[in-house]
Structure formats: C-alpha cells, structure tokens
Amino acid sequence: EQLYETVRGKAGREQRRQKFWKDRKAHGPVYEPGDQVWMQVPEKTKLGAYWDGPYEVQKKLDWNTYRVKQMKG
C-alpha cells in the first residue's frame, strides 16, 4: 500500500510538471490593434498560396481570436 501511494504521488508530480511545460509553450504570439499580420490559408493544392495578407488587427476578441481587416495594396 505504501508503494502504491509513493508511485501515485510521483505520477501526479510528473503530470503537473509536464502540464506546466506544455502550457508554457502552447500559447501563440499576442497581437495588438494596429499590428499587421498574414493569415495562413488552408490550401489543398501543392502550388497554392500558403499565406494571405497583409491584414490589420482591428480588435482582440479572445486570447487567440482577433478581428482583422484586409489592407489595401
């Protein structure tokens, strides 16, 4: 029973350690209103464009969601 508790404690600590490092790397870049960005296009063809833009960030809606406006030019 003591062995079971020891293993359970070590497994929990390791799980928290791995979650810490994964969460630390999981967040992408942060953009502010006025920043210029390019959007990745989910193109299925080999020769299709992978990026479209530039776009201007208008508003940050959520931690990873933005409202953007395509720039002229």
Image: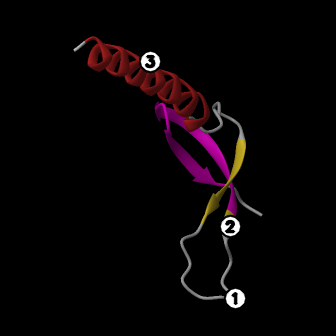
Callout 1, which amino acid?
Answer: Leu
Task: Identify the residue shown where x is 42% and y is 19%.
Answer: 10
Task: Identify the residue shown where x is 72% and y is 60%.
Answer: 72
The range drawn in magenta is 53-70
Q: Residue tagged by mark 1?
A: 47
Cα distance, mark 3 to mark 2?
Answer: 41 Å
Residues 22 and 44: in front is 22
Residue 30 place in picture, x, y as percent: 63, 32
Mark 1 crowd level (few <14, some 14–19, many ≥20, 10 Å Cα): few
In the shown orientation, is residue 2 left or right of residue 48?
A: left
Assign a secondary structure to mark 1: loop
Task: Identify the residue shown where x is 43% and y is 27%.
Answer: 15
Cα distance, mark 3 to mark 1?
Answer: 47 Å
Per the picture, the main secondary structure of the magenta-coloured stretch is: strand
| Mark 3 / mark 1, whichever is N-terminal | 3
Is 61 covered by the magenta stretch? yes
Q: Nearer the viewer, mark 3 or mark 2?
A: 3
Residue 51 circle label: 2
Figure label count: 3
